[in-house]
Image (tube, rainbow, N blue to C red):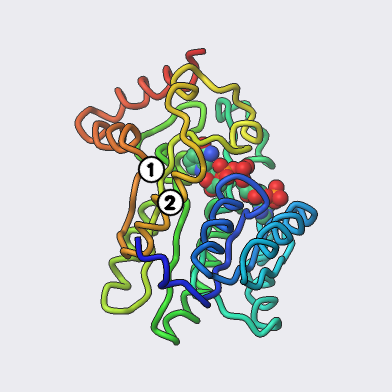
């Protein structure tokens, strides 16, 4: 990969306090990109900012914020402007899932998830896309999931939210085809982060067997983003699963996914 196109640019990463978001920050800093890091846990952002500043000659700004709050994306956009910054790259990474049957998950938790995984992602895209189109340059990377490719019992609302992200991102990438701005969707499979701990799931046999590490997933995502691809599934096994779902009826996919998500 050409490691220079982002040198001196600024990347805004949501959900940078752990997992894939922190890894995006590290790899983008290695490419010479300045960073704006967003998440709720300020201390984590400070620690990451210090770690990166000690190793790379880039500016790191931290903007602690709860993005699930109504209009938080507008607040973030204004903070970026007030700081005299502009995002050349937007990594819409903040998100979480909830494990369990829809009937038993409290609505307030699901509402927060949808606010973050869908509403904040779309609003941030709209706000920063406008700036990028004015400059006619920019990259947007949306975090979806392998769960977007089939109905996923035990992650029903989460996987439906990620399907929304997948189709939204791919459609947007097409709308942007005549500009120098692009939108790429990254769909990871299970990856070693805080995701399962937050969702409340013990890893199943399938997940333990095929778990990927953040550095590899992030490398795949950034490579696809720099090529302005509409979307990419992380890893050959996950790509095979996504592809094979097209060949069988969706009710079979739902039954199979249920097995893989519950078999310990
Ligand atoms: N790991 C997987 O297996 C997997 C698979 C497919 C897709 N994904 C997707 O990958 C993305 C990154 O997740 P991850 O695996 O890295 O999980 P993670 O380690 O739990 O990281 C999630 C990040 O989102 C932030 N976040 C959560 N709620 C937030 C809020 N209300 N406002 C602002 N930031 C918030 C968290 O920071 P704070 O808690 O500090 O706010 C954290 O930095 C998510 O969109 C997830 O759905 C993950």
- Looking at the rendered structure, the secondary structure element under dot 1 is loop
Q: CA distance from mark 2 to mark 1?
A: 9 Å
Camera-side residue of 249 and 200: 200
Q: Which residue is mark 1?
A: 234
Name of the residue lying farthest toward the front: 55
User: Is residue 214 shown above or below 90?
Assistant: above
In-image side of 126 versus 85 (left or right): left
Which quarter shows the N terminus?
Answer: bottom left
Residue 22, position as x, y percentages in the image: 61, 52
Q: Earlier in the sequence, mark 2 or mark 1?
A: 2
Asked if residue 158 shows in the view, the reply is no
Residue 214, position as x, y percentages in the image: 51, 43
User: Is residue 162 shown above or below 90?
Assistant: above
Residue 119, position as x, y percentages in the image: 55, 58
Asked if residue 16 shows in the view, the reply is yes
Q: Residue at x 51, y 76 (%)?
A: 9
User: Is residue 200 shown above or below 14?
Assistant: above
Picture quadrant where residue 54 is located:
bottom right
Viewer-nearest of discs 2 and 1: 2
Q: Which residue is mark 2?
A: 219
Picture quadrant where residue 178 is located:
bottom left
Circle 1 crowding by C-alpha within 10 Å: few under 14, some 14–19, many from 20: many
């Amino acid at each position: 990969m050409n490691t220079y196109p982002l040198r001196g640019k600024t990347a805004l990463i949501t959900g940078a306090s752990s997992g894939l978001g922190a890894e995006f920050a590290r790899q983008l800093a290695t490419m010479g990109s300045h960073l704006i890091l967003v998440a709720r846990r300020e201390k984590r952002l400070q620690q990451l900012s210090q770690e990166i500043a000690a190793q790379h000659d880039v500016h790191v700004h931290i903007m602690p914020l709860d993005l699930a709050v109504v209009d938080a994306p507008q607040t973030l956009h204004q903070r970026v402007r007030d700081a005299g910054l502009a995002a050349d790259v937007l990594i819409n990474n903040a998100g979480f899932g909830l494990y369990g049957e829809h009937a038993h998950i409290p609505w307030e938790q699901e509402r927060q998830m949808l606010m973050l995984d869908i509403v904040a992602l779309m609003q941030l895209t709209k706000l920063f896309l406008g700036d990028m189109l004015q400059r006619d340059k920019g990259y947007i990377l949306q975090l979806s999931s392998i769960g977007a490719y089939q109905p996923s019992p035990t992650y029903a609302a989460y996987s439906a939210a990620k399907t929304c992200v997948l189709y939204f991102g791919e459609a947007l990438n097409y709308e942007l085809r005549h500009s120098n701005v692009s939108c790429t969707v990254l769909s990871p499979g299970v990856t070693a982060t805080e995701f399962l701990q937050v969702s409340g799931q013990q890893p199943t046999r399938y997940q333990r067997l095929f778990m990927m590490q953040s550095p590899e997933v992030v490398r795949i995502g950034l490579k696809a983003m720099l090529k302005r691809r509409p979307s990419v599934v992380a890893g050959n096994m996950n790509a095979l699963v996504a592809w094979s779902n097209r060949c069988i009826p969706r009710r079979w996919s739902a039954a199979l996914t249920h097995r893989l998500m519950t078999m310990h």
